C-alpha cells in the first residue's frame, strides 16, 4: 500500500457549493489541495457564498444532484483525471450534501408523509451511500488508501423536540453514523478511513429560517453556549473535516465527533 501524498492531493466535496461545503472547499484550497466540488447550480446561496470557490484555481465543479448515480460517477471520473494530471492520489471524499426534509413532508413521526419519509432518507442517507460506494470502489480497484468524512447532525443523538421535530431527518442522520462506523470496521485493513461529524446549528442558508426565529435564537444561547451562545460558523466544521482527510489524522477511523457549541451537553 502506497502512502497518500498531501501535495496537491485531490479531495472530492459532495455538496461543496454553499454553506459548510463551501467553507470546506475554501479551506482545502488554502491547504493546497485540488478540489472536485459537487453540487446544484443557480441558487442564490451559491452565488453569495460560492463565488470565491468558483473563481479559485484548483476547483473543478461537477454540477448535478448528489442523489444521482450519474452525478457521482461524473465526480469520480473528474477526480481521477485531476489526480492523474497532478500525479497524486484522491486523498479523500467529504460528503456534506443533505438537508431538512420539512418541505418534503418530514416532521414528527405521526405527521410524516410517505414521500416525506422516502425523500428525506434518499437525500440525507441515499446520497451518502452513492458517494461512499463510488469512492471505495475506486480505492479498492487502485489499491489506494483514503479518507471519507460524512456530515451528519447533532439531532441524530441529541434530539430537540420543541423546535426540531423532524424524525425522518434524525433517522437518516443516525443511519449515516451506522454506515460510517460499519465501513470503518470493514475497510480498515485496506487503509480506508471513515469518520462522521455531527454539526450543531450552523449559520448556513439551510439554517437561516431557524436562526431568524427569535424564540430559537434565544434557545440557542442556552443550547449552544460556547463563544457567547448562538449558531456556529461553517469554518468551525470545515476545520475538522479538512483535518480528518489529512495525513495528520491517519490513525483515526470509526469516530463520530460533534461540532455543536455544547448542544449535546447542554439542556437548552
Image: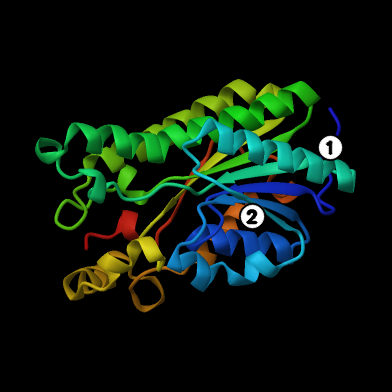
Query: Which quadrant would the N terminus be assigned to in this image?
Result: top right
User: In the image, is residue 119 above or below residue 86?
Assistant: above
Q: Residue furthest left?
A: 110
Can you give x and y, in whole percent of width and height, for residue 56 in the image? 71, 67
Q: Quadrant of the C terminus?
A: bottom left
Residue 219 visible in the picture: yes
State the residue at coordinates (33%, 73%): 230
Residue at the spot x=76%, y=22% of the render? 141
Q: Which residue is mark 1?
A: 3
Q: Which residue is mark 2?
A: 242
Mark sitting earlier along the chain (2/1): 1
Q: Residues within 10 Å of mark 1 (few under 14, many from 20)?
A: few
Assign a secondary structure to mark 1: loop
Image coordinates of residue 161 in percent, x first then y, are 16, 51
Tell whether 20 sits left or right of 53: left
Q: Quadrant of residue 95?
A: top right
Circle 2 — which element?
helix
**Looking at the image, residue 70 lies above or below residue 245:** above
Amino acid at each position: 500500500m502506497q502512502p497518500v501524498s498531501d501535495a496537491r492531493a485531490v479531495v472530492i466535496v459532495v455538496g461543496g457549493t454553499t454553506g459548510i461545503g463551501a467553507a470546506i472547499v475554501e479551506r482545502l484550497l488554502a491547504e493546497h489541495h485540488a478540489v472536485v466540488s459537487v453540487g446544484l447550480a443557480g441558487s442564490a446561496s451559491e452565488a453569495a457564498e460560492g463565488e470565491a470557490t468558483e473563481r479559485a484555481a484548483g476547483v473543478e465543479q461537477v454540477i448535478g444532484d448528489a442523489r444521482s448515480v450519474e452525478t457521482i460517477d461524473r465526480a469520480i471520473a473528474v477526480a481521477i483525471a485531476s489526480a492523474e494530471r497532478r500525479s497524486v492520489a484522491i486523498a479523500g471524499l467529504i460528503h456534506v450534501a443533505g438537508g431538512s426534509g420539512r418541505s418534503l413532508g418530514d416532521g414528527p413521526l405521526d405527521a410524516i408523509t410517505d414521500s416525506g419519509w422516502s425523500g428525506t432518507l434518499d437525500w440525507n442517507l441515499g446520497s451518502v451511500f452513492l458517494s461512499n460506494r463510488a469512492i471505495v470502489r475506486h480505492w479498492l480497484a487502485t489499491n489506494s488508501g483514503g479518507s471519507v468524512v460524512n456530515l451528519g447532525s447533532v439531532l441524530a443523538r441529541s434530539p430537540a423536540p420543541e423546535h426540531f421535530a423532524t424524525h425522518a431527518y434524525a433517522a437518516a442522520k443516525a443511519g449515516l453514523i451506522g454506515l460510517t462506523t460499519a465501513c470503518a470496521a470493514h475497510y480498515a485493513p485496506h487503509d480506508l478511513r471513515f469518520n462522521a461529524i455531527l454539526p450543531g446549528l450552523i449559520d448556513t442558508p439551510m439554517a437561516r429560517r431557524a436562526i431568524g426565529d427569535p424564540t430559537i435564537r434565544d434557545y440557542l444561547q442556552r443550547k449552544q453556549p460556547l463563544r457567547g451562545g448562538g449558531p456556529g460558523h461553517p469554518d468551525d466544521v470545515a476545520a475538522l473535516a479538512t483535518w480528518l482527510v489529512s495525513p495528520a489524522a491517519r490513525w483515526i477511523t470509526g469516530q463520530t465527533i460533534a461540532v455543536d457549541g455544547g448542544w449535546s451537553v447542554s439542556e437548552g
